[in-house]
Image (cartoon, helix red, strand yellow):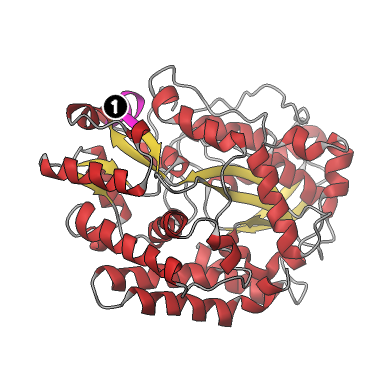
Amino acid sequence: MSSKSSKPLSRRQFLRITAGAAATTQFSIMFSPSLFGQRSPLSSLAAQQATVAFWGWPTQITRSLDEQGKDKLAERILADTGVKVEVNLVDQPDLNPKLRAALPAGTGPDVIATDFDVMNPYWQFMAPLDDFAEKEWGKNWKTDIFSPTAVQEMGLVSQIVGQTDKTFYLPGNMQLLGWLYYWIPDFQKNNIDPTSFKTFDDFTAACKKLKAAGLAPIAASNHPAELADWYKMLVEVTAPGKMDNVQRGVGKFTDPDMVEAFKLVGMIYNELAEKGAIGTDAGTSIQAFQSHQTAMAGTFTGTPWFGFLNNDSATVRNDIRNNWGTFQMPGSKGLAATDGGMAIVASSKNKDDAWKVVKWITVGHGAELAAKDTDQPYGAKAIKPGSTGTNFDTNLAGPLFKALASGNNVFRRVLCADVYKAIGTTIPGVVTGQLSPQDAAAELQDAFDQGCGKWIKKT
């Protein structure tokens, strides 16, 4: 984190309900020229006034905030590239119906901020970016410019579109899910070493040890994004590698090993999380961990926390730098994915200028500013998060950035918005005993069959 304080920022679903939230940033607008091209003076480019329509939802890559929290995205893109951008941001659930109406009719934007939770079957309306990228960076641009994890994700999108020889978006900031945060002093006092965890049972045994010592083991919330994260993590425990297959028609959500994941989520919330976690909002859950009411945090696990764990409290800033560690859920896999990427709509009449916008946000000056402000890792290798020179760089950032950059993380995302939504609506019923794990799994399967089965099975 920067040496200055920072207000909460980032995580795609978290910002669905906090779309108007501002964030304090710490960077200088006098920035050295990027590896990806020197900024052009506004005076020499303003006359062009090319206009790019940009749709998205409020997240890190769709805003560029000054030190007062004011959005400068359009202004900075114009200053650096000469391209005038018209930004249209809506809450993420509202973007899906907008795309559903606009893209088939050819009336959509030039550029879209992408996320699997939104894009669903709309990748087919995106323009291949290979010619632009190869002209910019050469034939081996993917591996030269992007991390192995980012290249892996771009490849998955190409599979979904059904054109494996083409690339349809550039990843911006990346996320690694499936890692829990913990108070190092609590673990040390109770002789718990997370590096010794080999199985999920090892993890639950540690939780019970903390509970016996009078500590609430885990902070958790009822936010749909977090519920989906828990389910995806625990599917890797009960049915390793199967999430990817089920979403391609190989197996079903109703298979016993997939159902078992619902049982584990219920156990987490009822036995290991703080009392009433399923009725707790994300902000309250975060504060519970920050104020040391719990020994661990399961709220938005992994790198998504970096943007909003820190706040104006000097105590919290000290704790994130010195007192918190992280470990991967044993028996699971790191869930590496783009929080927000950028794609060009195939029907755009302004692709050259759209490319300038895409490049600026994902690998250029915009990415530099955002990465240094929020400590979020990016898909582009040259975009480096800031370093605090404290234990944060070792205990939190170090393990997560290393895992994300290695490319060894299994990509396990929910590829269909309807299934994602069903996870968030069924888990509370399972936790409260109003819905059986079998019935919850059946609802997921119905959502898949009705909303996404046809297009997924074509890939």
Residue 43 is situated, as x and y percent measured from the top left of the image, at: 77, 33
Q: Residue furthest top?
A: 389
The answer to whether residue 19 shows anywhere in this view is no
**What's the residue at 20%, 57% (across, down)?**
271
Which quarter of the figure is the N terminus placed in?
A: top left
Give whichever of 315, 202 is nearer the camera. 202
The dominant secondary structure in magenta is helix
Q: Is label 1 in a helix, a strand or a loop?
A: loop
Residue nearer the viewer, 245 or 125: 245
- Residue appearing at x 74%, y 34% in the figure: 145
Residue positioned 29% across, 28% down in the render: 319
The total number of labels drawn is: 1
> In the image, is 137 to the left or to the right of 86?
right
Q: Which residue is more in the foreground, 459 or 222? A: 459
The answer to whether residue 449 of the structure is visible from this angle is yes
**Quarter of the rendering containing residue 118:** bottom right
* 244 left or right of 46 in image: left
319 vs 231: above or below: above
Q: What is the span of residues highlighted in magenta in the rendered image?
A: 316-325
State the residue position of label 1: 323
